[in-house]
Image (tube, grey):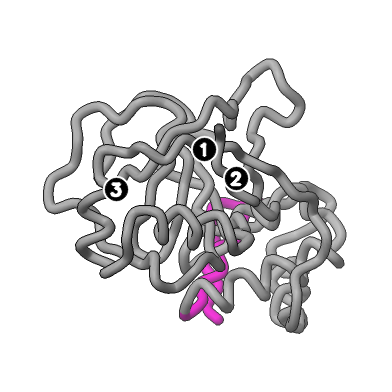
Amino acid sequence: MRLRHCGDRALLVELDDLGEVVAFYDALVVGPPEGVVDIVPAARTLLVRFEPPATPHAIEAALRSVRPASGARGNTGEVRIPVVYDGADLKDVAVLTGLAEREIVAAHTATPWTVAFCGFSPGFGYLTGGDPRLAVPRRAESRVRVPAGSVALAAGFSAVYPRESPGGWQLIGRTEAVVWDLDADPPALLRPGTRVRFTEAT
């Protein structure tokens, strides 16, 4: 673990891989140091924000004493997302995985996913823990426009595009579920630690 100061009210925790990030994040959520107001996970880092009277020195000492969580993640809620599996890259994913298109649907819906972290755009959750056979690379060329609600795979993750944007993930379907809504509280449907179950829409 490496700690870097980000101004006088945040510390960046650098870790070796996503597994360490998830374990450290879970431990902090259960018992955050006094004064911590926000914890933002990423692929290999955690940003820990705090407010006075907490000091950088006190937070740094507290972080160094954290024992990463082990085992199953705590219950942070489950979201079900219905998907129409007719994505533009479904055939390509079949070629990449060696699975039939119906087998891809079965694999994507059979295993629960978990939001490891968010990024790229507001509400974009990086989902892990799905069927390992669905680990496919990003597209060789990104699209200029990916429609909102597109359900995609890339590099061992799955995701739902919260709004129209450029993107290079493999599109396998689409959903009408709203994953980012500024009028909702909280705005993001998919937050770190949330379990996600994809279901096939009829």
Categorize mark 1 by other alpha carbons within 10 Å: few (<14), some (14-19), many (20+). Answer: many
Q: Which residue is mark 1?
A: 83
Q: Against 131, is 146 above or below?
A: above
Q: Is residue 87 left or right of residue 37?
A: left
The answer to which quarter of the image holds residue 33 is: bottom right
Q: Against 78, is 81 above or below?
A: above
The answer to which quarter of the image holds residue 142 is: top left
Label pair 2/3, CB-CB below 8 angstroms: no
Q: Earlier in the sequence, mark 3 or mark 1?
A: 1
Q: Earlier in the sequence, mark 2 or mark 1?
A: 1
Magenta-tinted stretch: 1-16
Q: Against 139, is 201 above or below?
A: above
Q: Position of residue 55 (x, y in %)?
A: 75, 59
Q: Which residue is mark 2?
A: 199
Label pair 2/1, CB-CB below 8 angstroms: yes
Label 3, label 1: how many angstroms apart (C-alpha)?
13 Å
**Which residue is at the far top?**
183
Kindly identify the amino acid type of the residue bearing the numbered disc 3: Leu
